[in-house]
Image: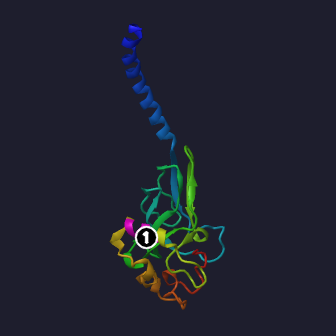
C-alpha cells in the first residue's frame, strides 16, 4: 500500500501534461478558417449591384479589415459557431470616407464548424442596412448596435435615428425612411434586406 501512495504523486504529475495537451488540441479543433469576399459585383446577379466597399468587417469577433469590391480577405482563424458578418461599408467610395459609409451586416447568421475552411461572400442578396428602400426591413437593432460598439469613430446615429445618417439621406430616394442607401434610386437596392 505504501508503494502505491508513493507512486500516486508521480501519476498525478504525469497526468497534468497529458490533460493540458488534450485540452489544447480540443481548443484548436474549435477553430474554423474563414475569409470574407466582397461579392457586390457578382456576375450571376443581372440587376443592380450596390457599389459597397467594405471598409471594416468582423465575424465571430475577429476583424478582417477593408475588402474592396471583387476582392477577398486573408484567411483568418475564427471560433467555430454562428454569427452575422458585421461591416461598415462605403457607397461608391473605395477611400471609405465616413460621409459615404453606413453600418451593414449579412442578412442571415453564417455558420462555420470546427476545422472548416470557408469563404463567406457578402453580396446584394444577403446584406441588410439601416435605410433600405420602402418595403424592405432595415437591419435589426442588435446588429446595428454591435457595429456602433465595434467602430464608434464613424459616429453613426442611434438606431432610432438610423435613417438620419448622412449616407442614408443620399441624393435620390423618395421613400419615407429618409432615402435609400447610398442615394440610389428608390427600390434600386431592393436586395438590402
Which residue is at 42% across, 82% downward? 165
**Residue 98 seen in the figure:** yes
Which residue corresponds to mark 1? 145
Q: With 130 as the anchor, is 148 left or right in this view?
A: left
Residue 138's x, y, as percent?
Answer: 54, 77
The number of numbered badges drawn on the structure is 1
Seen in the picture, residue 124 relative to 9 is either above or below; the reply is: below
Which is more toward the observer, 91 or 81?
Answer: 81
Seen in the picture, residue 106 relative to 159 is either above or below; the reply is: above
Residue 107's x, y, as percent?
Answer: 57, 68
Quadrant of res 19 = top left
Question: Which range is magenta?
Answer: 144-149
Most frequent secondary structure within the magenta stretch: helix
Dot 1 lies on which element? helix
**Residue 53 seen in the figure:** no
| Residue farthest along the left direction in this orientation | 153
Q: How is the image coloured?
A: rainbow
Residue 142's x, y, as percent?
Answer: 48, 69
Which residue is at 55% across, 45% downward? 114
Amino acid at each position: 500500500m505504501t508503494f502505491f501512495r508513493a507512486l500516486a504523486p508521480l501519476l498525478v504529475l504525469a497526468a497534468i501534461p497529458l490533460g493540458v495537451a488534450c485540452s489544447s488540441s480540443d481548443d484548436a479543433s474549435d477553430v474554423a478558417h474563414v475569409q470574407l469576399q466582397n461579392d457586390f459585383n457578382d456576375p450571376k446577379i443581372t440587376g443592380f449591384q450596390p457599389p459597397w466597399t467594405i471598409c471594416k468587417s468582423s465575424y465571430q469577433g475577429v476583424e478582417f479589415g477593408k475588402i474592396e469590391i471583387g476582392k477577398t480577405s486573408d484567411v483568418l482563424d475564427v471560433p467555430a459557431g454562428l454569427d452575422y458578418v458585421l461591416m461598415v461599408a462605403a457607397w461608391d467610395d473605395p477611400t471609405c470616407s465616413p460621409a459615404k459609409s453606413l453600418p451593414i451586416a449579412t442578412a442571415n447568421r453564417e455558420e462555420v464548424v470546427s476545422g472548416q475552411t470557408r469563404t463567406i461572400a457578402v453580396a446584394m442578396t444577403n446584406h441588410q442596412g439601416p435605410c433600405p428602400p420602402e418595403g424592405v426591413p432595415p437591419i435589426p437593432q442588435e446588429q446595428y448596435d454591435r457595429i456602433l460598439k465595434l467602430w464608434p469613430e464613424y459616429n453613426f446615429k442611434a438606431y432610432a435615428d438610423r435613417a438620419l445618417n448622412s449616407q442614408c439621406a443620399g441624393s435620390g430616394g423618395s421613400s419615407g425612411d429618409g432615402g435609400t442607401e447610398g442615394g440610389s434610386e428608390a427600390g434600386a437596392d431592393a436586395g438590402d434586406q
